[in-house]
Image (cartoon, grey):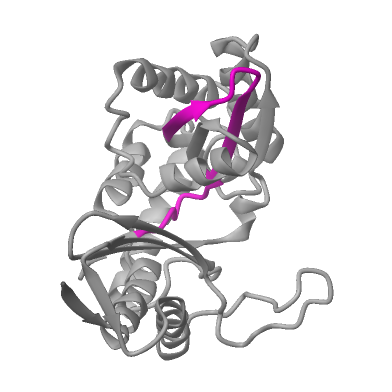
Amino acid sequence: MREISTEQISAEVARLCVETNRVLPADLEKSIRSASQTETSPLGREVLSGLGENMDAARELNLPVCQDTGMAVVFAEVGQDVHIAGGSFEDAVAEGVRRGYRDGLLRCSVVADPIRRGNTGDNTPPVLHARLVPGDHIRLTVAPKGFGSENMSRLCMFTPSASEDDLIGFVAETVKIAGGKPCPPVVLGVGIGSDFEGCALLAKKALCRPVSQRNPDPFYADLESRMLRAVNGLNVGPQGFGGSTTALAVNIEWYPTHIAGLPVAVNVGCHVTRHGTAIL
């Protein structure tokens, strides 16, 4: 049995909150910079070049890469041979988010009640997804999620008669409806299977996968490529001004489902689809 303190958890979550808001994953940044060279629209190339300059400025000035520093989504894989000492695991994660957003001078965007509103003032509570896994480590992934893109996400409960083209059409339609609102070029997390809430979680999880990494199943890797081609054929383009770079990647995660269903969720991520991982 290995002991990990709640203070260690809070400190690491706080660090990840700040780091992920200031510096994008390396492969995502590379993808944006590469797209600025291959984009077919002159205006699109100019926009993508500006996004690169914004990333440079954020790094140099230690500022968030986007003013919407998101709602903190935390994925935690907790080893079953870990003893958490010093208090509640959930409280420790929340404290880490509180410190990160307060000390990192990040915008606090969480309201206490979805209808009556009222800002909580410290960006808590986070959205926490925790799993018990073998081992004696804790793996933490922090993914700040802005709502300009989150609001454009959709879910459809298809029946098993739906074709692959129907799924591709649903993903492309989601992006077409969104237009420039989610600050394209976007990253799309697509969840296929499970049930109503499960496919949405798969889609969120898919956004935490590197944009350079295709699904290990060749069938779903091919489906990712076909979806990406369909989306980039929409001419939405960078920031919605038209062009060939509407999406940087489509990441699919899948799970078994019921014989009567085929749930599909699309979680839209903006060009600053942020995430970072640490292992304690």
Which residue is at the front of the view, 21 or 42? 21
242 horizontally vs 219: left or right:
right
**182 is higher (above) or lower (below) than 279:** above
Stretch in magenta: 250-275
For the point 70% across and 79% down, the residue is 112
All told, the count of numbered labels is 0
Characterize the magenta stretch by its predominant secondary structure.
strand
- Residue 96 lies, in percent from the top left, at 40, 82
- Residue 144 lies, in percent from the top left, at 47, 64
Let me know if residue 94 is in the magenta part.
Answer: no
Q: In which quarter of the image is residue 71?
A: bottom right
- Residue 220 lies, in percent from the top left, at 38, 21
Let me know if residue 261 is in the magenta part.
Answer: yes
**157 is higher (above) or lower (below) than 142:** above
- Residue 135 lies, in percent from the top left, at 18, 58
User: Could one spot residue 237 in this view of the protein?
Assistant: yes
User: Could one spot residue 246 in this view of the protein?
Assistant: no
* Residue lying at the far right of the rendered structure: 116
Point out the image quarter for the N terminus: bottom left
